[in-house]
């Protein structure tokens, strides 16, 4: 079964850090673009960060540049999103995704979604 499972979400104070993990099973992450998306209540799902499937280039939304870092461990088949200097506006459900994209991933590029993990940043 093809599956992505996120972990690492939780409640943190503004300025704090969290690291989200995304474990893949049933397929190899190395052959896919990897993306992190988020969806806040009442808002559309938006791309946060991604790794290109062609050359490993990384992309970040302007709102998280300099604070978030995406990475992957191909040996473990796990992707990560390190989130530092968190702000209340980062509060959302975060989704891991795999698909095909040579540029920043968009929702349309996704083949597999994780179930999501809640991140709440208190002020």
Image (cartoon, rainbow, N blue to C red):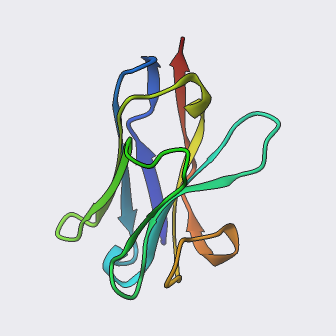
Q: Is residue 33 depicted above or below 13 in this figure?
A: below
Kindly identify the residue that appears in the image at 53 percent across and 82 percent down.
101
Marker count (numbered): 0
Residue in the foreground of this view, choosing between 98 and 18: 18
Residue in the foreground of this view, choosing between 30 and 55: 55
Residue 6: x %, y % from top left? 44, 48
Kindly identify the residue that appears in the image at 54 percent across and 11 percent down.
123
Is residue 26 rendered to the left or right of residue 62?
left
Residue in the foreground of this view, choosing between 13 and 3: 13
Residue 110: x %, y % from top left? 61, 73
Q: Is residue 103 depicted above or below 12 in this figure?
A: below
Kindly identify the residue that appears in the image at 45 percent across and 18 percent down.
14
Q: Residue furthest bottom?
A: 54
Q: Quadrant of residue 40?
A: top right
Kindly identify the residue that appears in the image at 54 percent across and 71 percent down.
104
Q: Is residue 12 depicted above or below 74 in this figure?
A: above
Q: Is residue 49 depicted above or below 31 in this figure?
A: above
Is residue 26 rendered to the left or right of residue 43?
left
Q: Residue furthest left?
A: 75
Residue 67: x %, y % from top left? 38, 41
Residue 35: x %, y % from top left? 49, 63
Q: Residue furthest top?
A: 123
Residue in the foreground of this view, choosing between 67 and 45: 67
């Amino acid at each position: 079964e093809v599956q992505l499972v996120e972990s690492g979400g939780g409640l943190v104070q503004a300025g704090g850090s969290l690291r989200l993990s995304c474990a893949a099973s049933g397929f190899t992450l190395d052959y896919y673009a990897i993306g992190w998306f988020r969806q806040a209540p009442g808002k559309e799902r938006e791309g946060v960060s991604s790794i290109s499937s062609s050359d490993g280039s990384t992309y970040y939304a302007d709102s998280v540049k300099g604070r978030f870092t995406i990475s992957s461990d191909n040996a473990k088949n796990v992707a990560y999103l390190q989130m530092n200097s968190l702000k209340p506006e980062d509060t959302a459900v975060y989704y891991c995704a795999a698909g095909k994209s040579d540029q920043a991933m968009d929702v349309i590029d996704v083949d597999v979604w994780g179930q999501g993990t809640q991140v709440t940043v208190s002020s």
